[in-house]
Image (tube, rainbow, N blue to C red):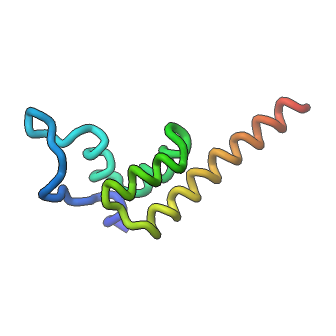
Amino acid sequence: MRRLFRRPLKEGRQRAHNGDPVRFARLVDRLGAPFLGVVGPMTIGAWAAAVLGIAHGLGRAELILWLAVGQAAVTASYVYSLAELTD
């Protein structure tokens, strides 16, 4: 379980001018697929999050699982909002 939340920095990772990894790379390296899978559908959409995750080198099966969890949360919030509006 610890592996999901701690990813080592790879050698070829893009770095900013001061030597620190760029912000997105730092977040994905630290939090991995759970971060991108849950936050991605809420912010940039599931397709864009999937493309970014694959481009960043995350595992496909793990990314698909977390994207499904994130998309389920977004869909549940839409259904709840519609139910509240129609009362």
Q: Nearer the viewer, residue 81 or 61?
A: 61
Quarter of the image where one finds residue 42? top right
Number of numbered discs present?
Answer: 0
Quarter of the image where one finds residue 53? bottom left
Q: Residue at x 84, y 38 (%)?
A: 83
Q: Nearer the viewer, residue 49 or 77?
A: 49
Counting from the top left corner in percent of width and height, residue 87 is at: 91, 32
Q: Nearer the viewer, residue 57 or 37?
A: 57
Counting from the top left corner in percent of width and height, residue 9 is at: 18, 56
User: On screen, 64 above or below 75?
Assistant: below
User: On screen, 53 above or below 24?
Assistant: below
Counting from the top left corner in percent of width and height, residue 76 is at: 70, 47
Q: Is residue 30 left or right of residue 87?
A: left
User: On screen, 39 above or below 11?
Assistant: above
Counting from the top left corner in percent of width and height, residue 32 is at: 35, 56
Q: Residue at x 51, y 37 (%)?
A: 43
Q: Quadrant of the N terminus?
A: bottom left
- Outermost right residue: 87
Q: Is residue 17 left or right of residue 63?
A: left
Q: Is residue 48 left or right of residue 29?
A: right
Q: Is residue 73 left or right of residue 43?
A: right
